């Protein structure tokens, strides 16, 4: 398994681990509440017993949750660790956010509105904003990272499957915040190389054209 | 148990002023509490209407009933109104003002005139917020968080909204200050700290958070105001300022503010459960100390709102760890409440239903908080509707239901009238069902990747939005049932004279309904704790009659 | 004052210790308020060390020192005013209160000239001269204006408060038995002083 390729699984595992324990505890709490309300209902005419507390019980239900939440913390942490440090050989894409669109720029100067990436290759996105705060969010890959005007954040991911996935802006940025969608398009390596080549040719052609226009 | 000939009630006595001035210039803590109640319910109605309109807009993708700018202003106003004008003052300023002095056996709060000043500041802040809607430029559209740089770029009326929040903060500080001194200095003879009702404890913890955290938001919002006026550059990235620093300062207050909102509601629940189980509270000291622990730990977890901004790894780990730990005192409270039901003699009147509803909904809110505290999961669900659902479960399912519980619990004492119990229960169940239908789908779509503050959305989320909007209608029906029930009771001619309808043991049940100006004819001397029930046999026979 | 009358007619609640506690709590909130700004200062000082160093040199240490002396002296006269009223010397108390107000006024006059000099040099938020400088210097002067400005506002409020107290002392509302209000104004005044004690080195001395 390639380092980082299981990020989605780690997030899902942490989520379901915490949700599972929570659901169980919630069930116990709710069940006890309902059970007590019926069992000790005043209509049954039983006398209430004044129990002032029980220190052993208090310690028990302090210590056990502490252990549980520490486990939850650990699960959350191991899924995050990888996200922080991109591998050395990651392909770098520069992402520029502005109200309300995304621009993706590749090493060779090619720019695109959608993020084209090869499958099974670590991608590092360097995030920069031209105006206000945005947030680069790919729900399918289970991460987001804020895009700030004064600070260059970066994050990386490893697309494991070919396909198209949504990129959303997750930090409120004004009028058309909800329309600030783009796509990450994961292609097989070969197709990606072709795409990049075609785009480069197109770009060079347009550069020559515009310089030709300028000369006139 | 019935009303003797008593001195004039707080509703009727004549002071120096008459007419409306007898109210808006009154320094009586009960009148001020009632003024807050009316004002905050008014704004609650406005906030609910905005929420209803937003949900209606979201019933289908694309434009339904309003444009994006209106929608953005609506969620901003909904946030500002609900947080600063309803939820924060909802319990401390309304029920704290009304009942704290009575609960600890005092004639009033320590500084009655300061108390009146707080109310006036509240009104001033509220008016400014209202004015900002009608000034040219349109209502603020920044979200209640006023994140920079958007809040210094937006051309809408951000300034009045900022100043409004600043003033409301000061109102809150003064109330907190008043309560701390009141609790320290005005307890009746014999009432030690550990004989205080736990609602007073929760207000005490809240008050400390209010006075120590609120100034930070005050100065922060002031700096944003100055930034907008003079372009000083303190947060503006174009001049070298740091928007992330703004976020830190904002959350240093606004996270503890969440505990300002929830702690008093926990206090109310702690009052209600022993009364309706008719037995002593389980683990008094643990509940009291957990309030303080929440106030303490709650002040050290603010950056968990900012896991995605790119802080240092150390900061991420510490804040995540502390976030998990802050859940513990809340869990202790929940366990103690449930244990208090054990071997009680439970009567399921409306206040208890609301209290149990609180426990259920707050638990969901708390557990989903754990899910967000996990770093990796947070990267995914931060700023999605999962968060929206989470804080509505805490703030509305928690504090909101706490406020409703308090209203049902203390209504006969405050107004000397009794509402219809059956209608109250119907109202509760409608609210409960509506609430879950409205907010639960947001968890699901949040996990599936629906970002928050979205005017429009992808078609795959429509089913959840649709269910959620239907839920908002049920919820509003529940609210209408509840409030008509109250209004009917207020307008009925028959006054309710049983001064202790729930057989409570705390001091407010010893004074007449609609308590007189100075609450007690003779300041009581306290010998027993607040929940020491000795008439276990009596209550059963009383029920039979 | 009729609001008070309404209450007084019912019962007189007097608790000097409680009032003192209230004042101290209020002073805490003021400290936290300024604390927020000191935090901002600390962060930017750390981020832009060199530029803060350059900018701080432009402030006039002499005026700063003079103002520090003035404020410290005024704190002393404030204490003397309270001591005097406790010893039932009404005249002396009023005298010291007036001196305090006078000193505070002197502080503000100094501050005025200091600000004006800066503004004449074109250094004020949003000015071209300032915008031409580096980000760190913009922030330094931004903080300088905001923090000393807010402090100046507190000095003004303090002056008004002490003025009201002088009036109370004349009327006899503040007297040797009941001087808690004067004491409150005094505590507030010391807070204003203390905040300056921190502002002075942060802006003028540390270069």
Image: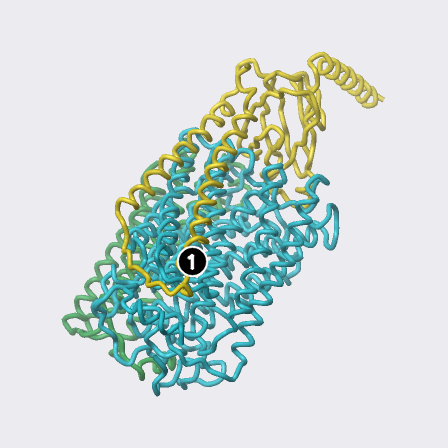
Chain colours: A yellow, B cyan, C green
In the picture shown, does residue C135 fall above or below B498?
Answer: above
Q: Who's the residue at 29% across and 69% down the image?
A: B535
**Residue B99 in the image, given as x and y percentages of width and height:** 37, 69
Q: Is residue A135 left or right of residue B356?
A: right
Q: Residue furthest toward the left?
A: C87
Q: Residue furthest bottom?
A: B5
Q: Nearer the viewer, residue C36 or C123?
A: C36
**Residue at image location 43% in from the left, 41% down from the top:** C140
Relative side of C130 to B300, left or right: right
Q: From the image, which quarter does the N terminus of chain B lie in?
A: bottom left
Image position of B418 with respect to B353: above or below = below
The residue that appears at 71% across and 20% down in the rendered structure is: A110
The picture places residue A77, in percent across and down from the top left corner, at 45, 29
Looking at the picture, tell me which residue is in the foreground, A101 or C169: A101
**Drawn side of residue C203 relative to residue A135, left or right:** left
Residue C95 in sight in this render: no
Disc 1 element? helix
Picture coordinates of residue B420, whole percent (x, y): 52, 73
Q: Position of residue B507 (x, y in %)?
A: 31, 71
| Chain letter for mark 1 | B
User: Could you classify mark 1 by the number of other residues whose Cα lies within 10 Å: few (under 14), some (14-19), or many (20 or more)?
Assistant: many
Q: Is residue A184 left or right of residue B259?
A: right
Residue matched to label 1? B265
Q: Residue C8 or A66: which is nearer the viewer?
A: A66
Kindly give the residue lying farthest to the right in the view shown: A216
Whether residue C20 is visible here, answered yes or no, is yes
Q: Quarter holding the C terminus of chain B?
A: bottom left
């Amino acid at each position: 398994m390639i380092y980082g390729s299981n990020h989605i699984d780690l997030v899902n595992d942490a989520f379901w681990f915490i949700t599972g324990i929570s659901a169980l505890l919630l069930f116990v709490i709710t069940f006890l509440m309902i059970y007590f309300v019926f069992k000790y209902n005043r209509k049954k005419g039983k006398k209430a017993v004044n129990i002032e507390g029980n220190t052993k019980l208090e310690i028990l239900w302090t210590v056990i949750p502490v252990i549980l939440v520490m486990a939850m913390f650990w699960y959350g942490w191991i899924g995050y660790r990888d996200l922080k440090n991109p591998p050395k050989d990651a392909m770098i894409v520069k992402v520029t956010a502005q109200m309300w669109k995304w621009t993706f720029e590749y090493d060779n100067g090619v720019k695109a509105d959608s993020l084209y990436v090869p499958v099974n290759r670590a991608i590092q996105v360097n995030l920069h904003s031209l105006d206000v705060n945005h947030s680069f969010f790919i729900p399918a890959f289970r991460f987001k990272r804020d895009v700030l005007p004064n600070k260059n954040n970066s994050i990386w991911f490893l697309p494991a499957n070919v396909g198209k996935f949504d990129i959303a802006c997750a930090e409120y940025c004004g009028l058309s915040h909800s329309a600030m969608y783009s796509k990450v398009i994961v292609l097989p390596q070969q197709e990606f190389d072709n795409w990049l080549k075609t785009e480069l040719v197109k770009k060079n052609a347009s550069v020559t054209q515009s310089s030709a226009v300028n000369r006139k | 148990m019935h009303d003797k000939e008593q001195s004039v009630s707080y509703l009727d006595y004549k002071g120096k002023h008459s007419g409306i001035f007898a109210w808006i210039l009154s320094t009586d803590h009960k009148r001020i509490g009632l003024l807050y109640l009316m004002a905050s319910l008014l704004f609650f109605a406005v906030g609910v209407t905005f929420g209803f309109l937003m949900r209606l807009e979201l019933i289908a993708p694309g434009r339904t009933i309003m444009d994006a700018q209106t929608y953005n202003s609506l969620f901003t106003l909904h946030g500002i109104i609900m947080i600063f004008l309803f939820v924060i003052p909802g319990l401390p300023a309304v029920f704290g003002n009304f009942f704290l002095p009575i609960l600890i056996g005092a004639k009033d709060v320590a500084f009655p005139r300061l108390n009146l000043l707080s109310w006036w500041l509240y009104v001033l802040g509220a008016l400014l917020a209202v004015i900002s809607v009608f000034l040219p430029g349109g209502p603020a559209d920044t979200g209640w968080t006023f994140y920079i740089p958007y809040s210094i770029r937006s051309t809408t009326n951000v300034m009045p909204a900022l100043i409004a929040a600043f003033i409301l903060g000061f109102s809150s500080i003064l109330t907190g200050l008043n309560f701390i001194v009141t609790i320290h200095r005005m307890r009746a003879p014999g009432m030690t700290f550990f004989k205080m009702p736990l609602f007073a404890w929760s207000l005490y913890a809240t008050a400390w958070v209010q006075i120590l955290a609120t100034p930070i938001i005050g100065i922060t919002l002031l700096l944003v105001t100055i930034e907008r006026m003079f372009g000083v550059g303190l947060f503006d990235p174009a001049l070298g300022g740091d928007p992330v620093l703004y976020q830190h300062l904002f959350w240093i207050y606004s996270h503890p503010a969440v505990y300002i909102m929830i702690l008093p509601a926990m206090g109310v629940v702690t009052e209600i459960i022993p009364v309706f189980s008719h037995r002593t509270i389980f683990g008094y000291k643990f509940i009291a100390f957990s309030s303080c622990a929440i106030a303490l730990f709650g002040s050290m977890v603010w950056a968990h709102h900012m896991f995605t901004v790119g802080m240092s790894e150390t900061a991420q780990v510490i804040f995540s760890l502390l976030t998990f730990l802050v859940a513990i005192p809340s869990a202790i409270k929940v366990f103690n409440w449930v244990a208090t039901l054990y071997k009680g003699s439970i009567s399921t009147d409306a206040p208890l239903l609301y209290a149990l509803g609180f426990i259920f909904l707050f638990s969901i809110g708390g557990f989903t908080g754990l899910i967000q505290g996990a770093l990796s999961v947070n990267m995914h669900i931060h700023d999605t509707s999962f968060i929206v659902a989470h804080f509505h479960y805490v703030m509305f399912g928690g504090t909101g239901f706490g406020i409703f519980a308090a209203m049902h619990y203390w209504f006969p004492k405050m107004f000397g009238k009794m509402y219809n119990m059956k209608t109250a229960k119907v109202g509760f169940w409608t609210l409960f069902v509506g609430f879950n239908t409205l907010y639960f789908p947001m968890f699901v779509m949040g996990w599936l990747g629906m970002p928050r503050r979205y005017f429009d959305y992808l078609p795959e989320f429509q089913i959840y939005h649709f269910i959620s909007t239907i839920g908002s209608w049920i919820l509003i029906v529940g609210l209408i049932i509840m409030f008509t029930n109250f209004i009917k009771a207020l307008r009925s001619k028959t006054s309710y004279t049983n001064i202790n309808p729930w057989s409570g043991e705390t001091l407010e049940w010893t004074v007449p309904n609609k308590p007189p100006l100075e609450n007690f004819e003779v300041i009581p001397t306290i010998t027993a704790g607040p929940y020491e029930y000795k008439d276990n046999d009596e209550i059963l026979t009383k029920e039979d009659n | 004052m009729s609001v008070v009358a309404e209450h007084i007619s019912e019962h007189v609640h007097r608790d000097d210790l409680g009032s003192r506690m209230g004042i101290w709590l209020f002073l805490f909130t003021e400290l936290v308020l300024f604390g927020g700004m000191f935090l901002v200062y600390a962060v930017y000082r750390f981020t832009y060390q060199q530029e803060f160093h350059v900018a701080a040199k432009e402030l006039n240490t002499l005026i700063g020192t003079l103002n520090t002396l003035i404020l410290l002296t005024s704190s002393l006269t404030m204490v003397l005013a309270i001591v005097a009223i406790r010893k039932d010397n009404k005249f002396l108390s009023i005298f010291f209160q007036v001196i305090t107000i006078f000193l505070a006024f002197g502080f503000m006059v100094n501050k005025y000239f200091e600000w004006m000099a800066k503004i004449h040099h074109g250094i004020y938020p949003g000015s071209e001269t300032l915008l031409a400088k580096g980000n760190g210097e913009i922030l330094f002067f931004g903080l300088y204006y905001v923090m000393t400005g807010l402090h100046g506002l507190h000095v003004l409020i303090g002056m008004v408060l002490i003025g009201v107290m002088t009036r109370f002392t004349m009327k006899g509302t503040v007297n040797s038995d009941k001087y808690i209000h004067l004491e409150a104004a005094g505590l507030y005044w010391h807070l204003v002083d203390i905040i300056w004690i921190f502002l002075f080195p942060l802006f003028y001395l540390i270069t």
